[in-house]
């Protein structure tokens, strides 16, 4: 996924409990959650004086008829979500936040991070429409019983058995998996990396 | 990919050198190649009296401005293909052929296979539009030098580094990888398997 970069995965402790009704649109909500998650991780690293090249954070939500769906609470909730998505189009939104130290020689950030002035911040978002096939109650139950639904926004994994339930998508597939690869690489990794590590590493 | 089925991969010896100009459309060409590949494998198994439940064969081509593209001959050819696809939409076509013995108790085939009457045959096709981003000569060279292009129709792998070059798709992502998962599962695996192995296996 990260195209040759060496990386470490750190879980954010941000609670992800922002009040959805206080945002004008689903995209504003997912942007703010992604920003808070990423700043939290970057701040902890900076407090520990850990060397940071680039902190990449993301959050994904699904919208259907203007309602935001995140990870299902349990199997019953997952079945309810999938029943709603059955035979219709939903949209997957991912917001990505990139944070670098202000003195970075690796990555050209977009602007100073107002919440923590030790950092530059770069933000972008992507959305993809997903057409889910018409599901019978039998297929929903069988699928949820595979156990792959609970840790995924929208209650399915397009990259696994859930892929069989998807008639088609319009947009970036990797955004549905939770990370918009094309925008990350073309608009950021290939252009804002000061030393163009990727281009050199494969040459 | 094959959703819990136990399978073995067998390479077809069919030469894949049908005369493209003798077919009315690219889809007719890819259907015939897939059929010949699959019948060849099934016939060899039947000649050896190997037990067959289901033989699944597929072939994938790319079309761009009505020209058929298959695997590139070499790196130079891969660069030429990608230069043509740059900044435009191409279409990925996959034809799938399913073959079962006429006395199968596993899978309900669609019709008798005229070329080898020991078998029933089921055929279907899928197409997906792919928008490739505008590529610089530097990116094309770097990408082809990763070595992931030569064994892939169209000269790129959407499931690997090539995914970063794809702005978006319209249709089934797995069809671009070379196998239309949704149509295989929903129209065939979930409906024509006599004992519904998948549904039972995950319950």
Image (tube, coloured by chain):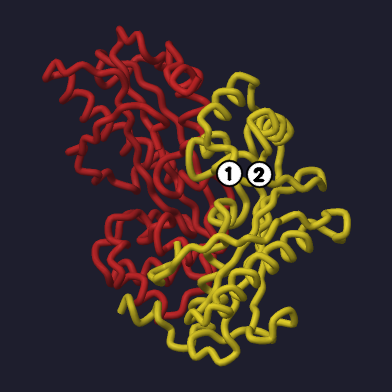
Chain colours: A yellow, B red
Distance in Å between CA atoms under marks 2 and 1: 6 Å
Residue B102 is situated, as x and y percent measured from the top left of the image, at 30, 10
Residue A129 is situated, as x and y percent measured from the top left of the image, at 67, 50
Residue designated by label 1: A151
**Residue shown at 11% from the left, 19% from the top:** B48
Q: Are marks 2 and 1 in contact (CB under 8 Å)?
A: yes
Query: Can residue B40 be seen in this snapshot?
Result: yes
**Residue shown at 65% from the left, 72% from the top:** A39
Asked if B53 appears above or below A15 in the picture, the reply is: above
The tag on residue A72 is: none
Asked if A188 appears above or below A24 in the picture, the reply is: below
Residue A156 occupies quadrant = top right
What is the chain identity of the residue bearing mark 1?
Answer: A
Q: Nearer the viewer, residue A140 or B88?
A: A140
Asked if A143 appears above or below B25 in the picture, the reply is: above
Residue B60 is situated, as x and y percent measured from the top left of the image, at 38, 45
Residue designated by label 2: A71
Residue A196 occupies quadrant = bottom left
**Residue shown at 40% from the left, 64% from the top:** B161
What number of labels is visible?
2
What is the chain identity of the residue bearing mark 2?
Answer: A
Which mark sits nearer the N-terminus, 2 or 1? 2
**Residue shown at 47% from the left, 37% from the top:** B181
- Element assignment for label 1: loop
Q: Nearer the viewer, residue A123 or B72?
A: A123
In screen coordinates, is B2 left or right of B150?
right
Q: Residue placed farthest to the front in the image?
A: A48
In screen coordinates, is B23 left or right of A77?
left
Asked if A42 appears above or below A176 in the picture, the reply is: below
């Amino acid at each position: 996924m990260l195209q040759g970069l060496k990386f470490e995965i750190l879980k954010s402790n941000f609670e992800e409990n922002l009040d959805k009704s206080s945002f004008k649109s689903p995209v504003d909500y997912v942007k703010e959650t992604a920003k808070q998650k990423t700043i939290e991780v970057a701040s902890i690293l900076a407090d520990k004086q850990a060397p940071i090249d680039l902190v990449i954070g993301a959050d994904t939500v699904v919208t259907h008829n203007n309602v935001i769906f995140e990870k299902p609470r349990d199997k019953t909730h997952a079945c309810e979500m999938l029943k709603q998505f059955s035979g219709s189009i939903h949209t997957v939104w991912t917001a990505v936040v990139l944070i670098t130290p202000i003195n970075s020689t690796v990555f050209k950030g977009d602007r100073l991070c107002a919440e923590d002035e030790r950092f530059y911040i770069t933000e972008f978002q992507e959305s993809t429409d997903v057409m889910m096939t018409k599901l019978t109650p039998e297929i929903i139950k069988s699928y949820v019983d595979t156990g792959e639904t609970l840790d995924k926004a929208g209650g399915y994994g397009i990259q696994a058995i859930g892929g069989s339930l998807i008639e088609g998508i319009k947009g970036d597939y990797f955004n549905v998996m939770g990370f918009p690869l094309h925008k990350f690489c073309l608009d950021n990794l290939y252009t804002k990396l000061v030393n163009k590590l990727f281009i050199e590493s494969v040459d």
